Image (cartoon, rainbow, N blue to C red):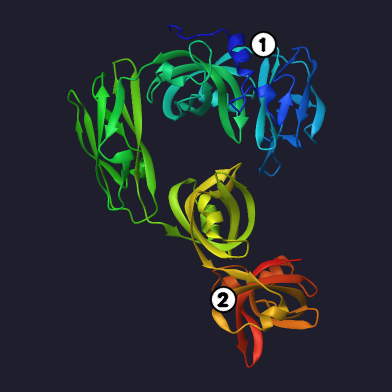
């Protein structure tokens, strides 16, 4: 095989040493500075020390996945700040100057790793190298199963491009898929990916060190060894962005093909809604698909086009998406769903604001069945919604470090504004089934533990809570058993949400829902 764009391994590694999430010089961020962003340790073992200076508290980010298998076959997954072979004298600290010492035992082979330090919203990347990395020819599966920090050479098809500046893309072979995080150009420089001309469908050989970031296996800042241009390419689709309406219909893929004929593969799980109606293999090939009407959530599939030169098969692919109904589900069903583009509508109580930044606010929403994080919704803050309010959001099932969350979301509405009041204030309010209050008190009598009928007290004021259900939306048997499940008892401070009502002249919180207890 003819080698193209090959840069000596050491140069490729050294180029890697000066990467940072900020466009400025990595050693001179305002909030966090290091004397060196490259740490070298002798292959026979040893240590190396750098100086870290920060304006606020700092900590290494947990980015390395570790899975431990128990005797019963169960597994526990955790994330740590360091690969198993490396030790650092300190993993977090306060503002000021800190001496960081990196150490490792003798290595049988050269290895590298990339660490991330967080401080005041900035990320400093530290590259650590022990010895000179050796290159191993490998399949995607061998890279996935292999150790972090080892340098691999792997050949596969470019199946998706995520970033055309840095060169972040997916490489796939018959054994699996890995993520390419950064691609160097012919001169070994970053942020010039387009100069390489890599397109989806091309067969590319790359070389670079492996890392695992948030469970994603990556080769970082790879050197391109060889590019074999695909003989088939998707030029365009007849429907904008490949998105078909809920009602279904036709979509045509317009191709360029220099091989012998065109074949098409539709994934098995999409064949019940997407079919091929015609293939034109002329000078300007086209493939026509028809989608059936969609009665469920949004669905999507990746269609693969193949051709051959008689010796090798070449591929290209495109994604076809069909809009779907928004599925109104309890949080538990959302948590159990697969990660994907399906739209879900969730209604529940805002239990806390997780974070706020320029990209939106993240907050927790809970109903009777469970709780989930709603990640970065721009319209939440402007809506005036607050902790305790009942709200509705729409978004997709996402995941971070194997923890579900609602992503690409829209804040739809505030269903009920909830006003926090004391028991004394609540007792003065008029009966109204449309006005919701949050009220707290110490439980001094439990009348019905099954449904959570209790008396709560605050000073000399006493209030009856007719029902303390597990959360918003509970009906039937779902309203039962909260006190037993959470161990709520007399003497606990209970906070509930409900409306002002009365029965036989007795004021009560009607159909209350649980918010918290102490």
Name the quadrant of the N terminus.
top left
Pick out the residue farthest to the bottom: 504
Nearest the viewer among 74 and 459 is: 459
Crowd class of label 2 (few under 14; some 14 to 19; many from 20; radius 10 Å):
some
Element marked by disc 2 = strand
Place of residue 30 in the rendered image (x, y in percent of width and height, measured from the top left): 69, 29
Q: Which mark is residue 54?
A: none
Between the residue at mark 1 and the residue at mark 2, the CA separation in whole angstroms equals: 69 Å
- Asked whether residue 510 is in view, the answer is yes
* Residue identified by numbered label 1: 132
- In which quarter of the view is residue 454 placed? bottom right
* Residue identified by numbered label 2: 435
Q: Residue at x 45, y 26 (%)?
A: 164
Q: Compared with residue 207, is residue 444 higher up or lower down, i.e. above or below?
A: below
Element marked by disc 1 = loop
In-image side of 127 versus 307 (left or right): right
Q: Residue at x 75, y 83 (%)?
A: 462
State if disc 2 and disc 1 touch (CB < 8 Å).
no
Q: Compared with residue 108, is residue 177 higher up or lower down, i.e. above or below?
A: below
Name the N-terminal-most of marks 1 and 2.
1
Front: mark 1 or 2? 2
Q: Residue at x 58, y 54 (%)?
A: 372
Pick out the residue farthest to the front: 30
In-image side of 227 versus 107 (left or right): left
In-image side of 428 versus 273 (left or right): right
Nearest the viewer among 398 and 53 is: 53
- Asked whether residue 64 is in view, the answer is no
Place of residue 343 in the rendered image (x, y in percent of width and height, measured from the top left): 44, 52
Place of residue 244 in the rendered image (x, y in percent of width and height, measured from the top left): 30, 46
């Amino acid at each position: 095989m003819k080698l193209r764009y090959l840069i000596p391994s050491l140069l490729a590694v050294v180029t890697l040493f000066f990467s940072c999430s900020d466009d400025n010089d990595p050693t001179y961020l305002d909030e966090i500075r290091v004397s060196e962003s490259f740490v070298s340790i002798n292959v026979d073992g040893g240590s190396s020390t750098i100086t870290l200076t920060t304006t606020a508290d700092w900590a290494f980010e947990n980015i390395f996945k570790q899975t431990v298998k128990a005797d019963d076959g169960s597994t526990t997954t955790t994330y740590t700040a360091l690969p198993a072979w490396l030790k650092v004298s300190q993993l977090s600290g306060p503002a000021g100057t800190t001496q960081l010492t990196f150490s490792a035992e003798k290595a049988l082979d050269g290895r590298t790793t990339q660490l991330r330090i967080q401080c005041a919203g900035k990320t400093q990347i530290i590259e650590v190298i022990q010895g000179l990395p050796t290159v191993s020819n490998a399949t995607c599966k061998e890279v996935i199963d292999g150790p972090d920090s080892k340098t691999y050479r792997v050949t596969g098809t470019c199946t998706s491009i995520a970033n055309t500046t840095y060169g972040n893309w997916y490489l796939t072979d018959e054994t699996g898929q890995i993520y390419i995080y950064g691609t160097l150009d012919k001169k070994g420089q970053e942020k010039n990916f387009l100069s390489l001309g890599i397109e989806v469908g091309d067969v590319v050989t790359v070389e670079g060190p492996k890392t695992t970031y948030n469970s994603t296996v990556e080769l970082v800042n790879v050197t391109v060894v060889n590019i074999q241009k695909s003989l088939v390419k998707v030029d365009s689709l007849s429907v904008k962005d490949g998105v078909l309406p809920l009602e279904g219909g036709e979509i045509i893929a317009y191709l360029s093909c220099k091989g012998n004929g065109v074949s098409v593969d539709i994934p098995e799980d999409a064949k019940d809604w997407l079919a091929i109606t015609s293939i034109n293999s002329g000078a300007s090939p086209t493939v026509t698909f028809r989608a059936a009407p969609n009665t469920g959530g949004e669905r999507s599939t990746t269609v693969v086009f193949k051709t051959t030169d008689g010796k090798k098969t070449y591929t290209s692919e495109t994604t076809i998406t069909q809009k779907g109904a928004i599925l109104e589900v309890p949080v538990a069903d959302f948590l159990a769903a697969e990660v994907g583009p399906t739209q879900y509508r969730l209604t529940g109580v805002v239990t806390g604001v997780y974070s706020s930044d320029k990209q939106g606010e993240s907050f927790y929403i809970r109903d009777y069945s469970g709780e989930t994080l709603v990640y970065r919704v721009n319209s939440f803050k402007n809506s005036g919604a607050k902790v305790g309010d009942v709200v509705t959001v729409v978004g997709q099932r996402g995941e971070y470090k194997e923890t579900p969350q609602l992503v690409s979301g829209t804040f739809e509405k505030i269903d009920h504004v909830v006003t926090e009041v004391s028991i004394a204030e609540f007792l003065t309010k008029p009966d109204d089934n449309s006005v919701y209050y949050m009220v707290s008190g110490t439980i001094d009598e439990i009348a019905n533990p099954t449904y959570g009928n209790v008396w709560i007290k605050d000073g000399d004021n006493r209030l009856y809570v007719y029902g303390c259900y597990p959360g918003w939306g509970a009906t039937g048997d779902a309203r039962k058993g909260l006190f037993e499940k959470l161990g709520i008892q007399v003497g606990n401070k209970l906070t509930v949400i409900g409306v002002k009502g009365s029965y036989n002249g007795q004021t009560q919180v009607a159909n209350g829902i649980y918010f918290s207890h102490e």
